[in-house]
Image (cartoon, grey):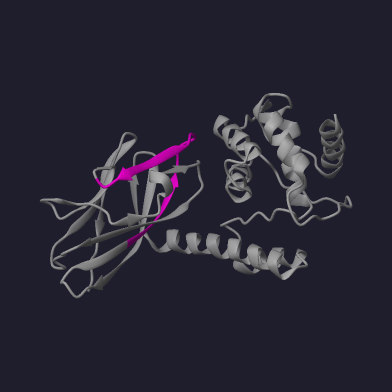
Amino acid sequence: MENKIRYSYGLVICLIATSGILTHISGEQFQIPSWIKKIAKWWHEGAIDDSEFMKGIQYLIENKIMVIHASNAKIVKENKIPSWVKNNAGWWANGTISDNDFVSSIQYLINSGIVVYSDVNSTENNQESKCDRFTTPAEKETCLKQIEYYTKIKSAMEESAKHVIGPVTFYYVNSESQATDNGKILLTIHFVVENNDNQEVTMTCLRQDSCNYALSDGQKEIPYATNTLVYGSLTLPPKTPRLVDWTFYSIFDTSQSYSFLVKEPWGTGSVPIRIHQ
């Protein structure tokens, strides 16, 4: 009962502070994708942290499902996401409350400055000014690091070669090579990957002998040494670019042409790789 009272109180604040939460197309309400409901459930259960949950919220904003409005309402700032918001996420995932009720609570986080939304299309100066609302050094540093991350992604996408494989665009940023004493080269390849579909896509590489990615010299495949696919997979929400690195350790002939191979159920293809020493 106490949680329900907190929810009702929080929802009243949200509805005062916001309007036009969900956009409408041709008079019909735009539905929140089902994969975001799964993320809300995992967040409520503690399976993922706040930052992972907010990546799904970023998708809602970027795709105009949730519209940010300025508010004149006086809302007290908090240093962390209130517990009633996480309760709302769980109730929404279970169908207890509506889409509008759920989005209202997220809108509250943004309007009150508890969560800072970083738009990769905004200028860096405008982004940094958003961090001025925070009072503690830790909060401001976290905000600036988030902006730095999205600025890095934006810059990489603008300057990189683009390769579309199925629903995913691979932006080949660059590669770094380091010679070792035994004649081998430690090669690290940097990508930005973006899912252009309306459904989530998963990159999968469980281990070296069961991986949908490899480097090829045209005759043989070279397995990876390390990558940034935590736990052997990386789920890509729609329109949410991510930085991904792959490292290979082998003997490379820099005069040869190499390709990064993608062999996923959702798409196959290759990305030309340049190796410099």
Residue 192 among those drawn in magenta: yes
Is 123 positioned to the left or the right of 258 in the image? right
Residue 164 shows in this picture: yes
Q: Residue at x 48, y 60 (%)?
A: 153
Q: Look at the picture and state if 28 lies above or below 214.
A: above
Q: Residue at x 38, y 47 (%)?
A: 169
Of helix, strand and loop, which mostly describes the magenta segment?
Answer: strand
Residue 21 shows in this picture: no
Q: Residue at x 60, y 47 (%)?
A: 49
Q: From which residue to which does the magenta span run?
A: 189-208
Coordinates of residue 187 in the picture (x, y in percent): 27, 64
Quarter of the picture containing the C terminus is: bottom left
Coordinates of residue 5 in the picture (x, y in percent): 87, 33
Coordinates of residue 51 in the picture (x, y in percent): 60, 51
Is 134 positioned to the left or the right of 183 in the image? right
Depth order, front residue of 207/106? 207
Q: Look at the picture and state if 149 lies above or below 212.
A: below
